[in-house]
């Protein structure tokens, strides 16, 4: 008869063997920007994948091979669904048959700006209900350091199964960059940290099946912190360059030319660019998870808070630039026709979550401007009582606007046509660099 230690070792090696031979069933909980590409990638590698989401509309679309995520091609999705490699469901019971469960649920902020980990708790409760010996659970949702140890592990321990021996738990931060043509799930290196060495080994083995480079770290907390360092680094540097832009503006210096000059230094400088404000699910939110946790430990995350303040002030600065530019043309904001180009939070994506365009439009409407928008990726905008539809970026629409504001610099826009037909452009992205036409261009 096997001793308990041998039985546990067997569970681990059985799991790793199943992963290595791609016999393991992989479940992905939360099929959004992160989960759907991941589930598709595992299915393409030949794994049996169960996709679980609480949204029946999304499940239905997956079943019909109809992707709702820009980075997942519908034909490819249709292929893996038709071969039954990817089965999507709203039924938690699918978790019971899974050998590895990857959690990719949202981690937003509450109205009070505190972390909202309720989606993680909900997903963990579903996993808890179906847990069985030999399963690996990996959390990918961005969260504060300590979430796996303090929140998820105790919930899993309530099953009576022993962590590190019967159940394995790891954190692996997601680094997906929607719209990035060069880097996708497969070639973005993946950091993995387990609750113990056995969990790290199992999670590393899992990701090595679909990702070119996996980098193990010593703990879940380290892996959670890695993600927060990456996103805080970006948020702080963007905050710094936005502040630089405000100073340059006051001094009458072109910040874009300054950055271009500084970027010629071959070492010790990395260019970041100013803009109308941060957007998306990550940069405006993730660093706040860290500053919240730091406060609990009596440490002020000064850089994070300062950068968040500067970045959050940018939409208002853009509105002031628009007002000043209209004023130079002898026009008040009230009654002026303003055309916003690009309402997604960054170029070439359809995601409008936390997009600075939303704030800019709301401030302009509050001042009595007549606002329209055009965005080839966003047909409709519904946010906080705002309901608008995208109009065509035609020469007539450009000519009719008192001011055209470039907020998201999508590559689909014809910038030469824009400077040829618009009268006045406020360009927050330097998208009209080196172009000239009829328009007067005011840069950030
Ligand atoms: N979008 C990005 O570019 C990006 C990049 C890196 C990391 N992240 C992080 O990854 C996580 C997921 O982000 P996303 O952008 O994919 O979110 P998303 O909103 O696009 O997708 C989340 C999905 O989870 C589903 N869901 C919610 N609760 C659930 C539950 N209890 N059980 C099953 N499904 C549930 C939702 O219906 C939704 O389909 C977040 O923590 C985010 O910070 C996102």
Image: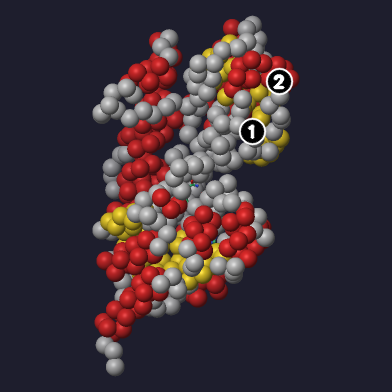
Camera-side residue: 74 or 27?
74
Residue at 56%, 31% (x, y): give it. 411
Label 1 vs label 2, nearer the camera: 2
Relative to 390, 244 lies left or right = left
**Where does the image place residue 242, in percent across and percent down from the top left?**
42, 25
Earlier residue among tags 1 and 2: 1
Residue at 27%, 26% (x, y): give it. 266
**Where does the image place residue 68, in percent across and percent down from the top left?**
62, 51
| SS class, disc 2 | helix
In the picture of the structure, the residue carrying the numbered disc 2 is 395
Q: Which mark is residue 18?
A: none
Mark 2 CB within 8 Å of ligand 1: no
**Where does the image place residue 380, in percent across and percent down from the top left?**
68, 39
Camera-side residue: 176 or 369?
176
Relative to 418, 10 lies left or right = left
Tell how many labels: 2
| SS class, disc 1 | loop
Q: In which quadrant of the rendered image does the N terminus lie? A: bottom left
The quadrant where residue 57 appears: bottom right
* Residue 365 seen in the current view: yes
On screen, 426 above or below 107? above
In the picture of the structure, the residue carrying the numbered disc 1 is 375
Camera-side residue: 143 or 405?
405
Residue at 72%, 17% (x, y): give it. 400
């Amino acid at each position: 008869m096997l001793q308990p230690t041998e039985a546990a070792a067997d569970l681990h090696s059985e799991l790793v063997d199943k992963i290595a031979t791609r016999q393991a069933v992989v479940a992905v909980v939360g099929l959004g920007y992160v989960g759907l590409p991941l589930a598709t990638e595992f299915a393409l590698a030949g794994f049996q994948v169960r996709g679980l989401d609480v949204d029946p509309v999304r499940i239905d679309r997956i079943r019909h091979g109809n992707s709702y995520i820009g980075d997942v091609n519908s034909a490819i999705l249709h292929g893996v669904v038709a071969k039954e490699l990817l089965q999507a469901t709203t039924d938690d019971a699918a978790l019971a048959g899974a050998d590895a469960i990857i959690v990719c649920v949202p981690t937003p902020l509450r109205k009070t700006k505190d972390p909202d980990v309720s989606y993680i708790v909900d997903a963990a409760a579903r996993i808890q209900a179906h847990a069985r010996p030999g399963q690996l659970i990996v959390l990918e949702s961005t969260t504060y350091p300590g979430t796996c140890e303090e929140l998820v592990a105790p919930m899993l321990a309530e099953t009576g199964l022993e962590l590190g021996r019967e159940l394995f738990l790891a954190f692996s931060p997601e680094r997906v960059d929607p719209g990035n043509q060069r880097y996708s799930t497969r070639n973005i290196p993946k950091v993995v940290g387990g609750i113990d060495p056995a969990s790290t080994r199992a999670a590393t083995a899992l990701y090595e099946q679909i990702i070119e480079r996996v980098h193990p770290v010593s703990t879940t907390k380290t892996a959670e912190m890695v993600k927060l360092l990456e996103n805080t680094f970006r948020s702080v540097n963007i905050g710094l360059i936005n502040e630089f832009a405000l100073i340059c503006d006051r001094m009458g210096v072109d910040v874009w030319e300054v950055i271009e000059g500084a970027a010629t230094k071959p070492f010790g400088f990395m260019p970041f660019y100013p803009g109308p404000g941060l957007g998306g699910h990550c940069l405006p939110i993730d660093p706040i998870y860290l500053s919240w946790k730091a406060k609990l430990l009596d440490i002020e995350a000064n850089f994070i808070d300062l950068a968040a303040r500067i970045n959050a002030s940018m939409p208002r600065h853009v509105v002031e630039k628009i007002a000043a530019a209209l004023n130079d043309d002898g026009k008040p904001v009230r009654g002026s026709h303003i055309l916003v180009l690009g309402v997604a939070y960054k170029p070439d994506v359809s995601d409008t979550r936390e997009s600075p365009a939303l704030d800019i439009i709301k401030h302009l409407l509050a001042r009595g401007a007549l606002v329209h928008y055009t965005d080839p990726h966003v047909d409709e905008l519904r946010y906080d009582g705002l309901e608008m539809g995208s109009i065509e970026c035609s020469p007539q629409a450009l000519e009719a606007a008192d001011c055209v504001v470039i907020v998201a610099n999508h590559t689909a826009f014809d910038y030469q046509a824009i400077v040829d037909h618009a009268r006045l452009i406020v360009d927050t992205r330097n998208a009209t660099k080196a172009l000239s036409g009829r328009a007067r261009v005011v840069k950030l």
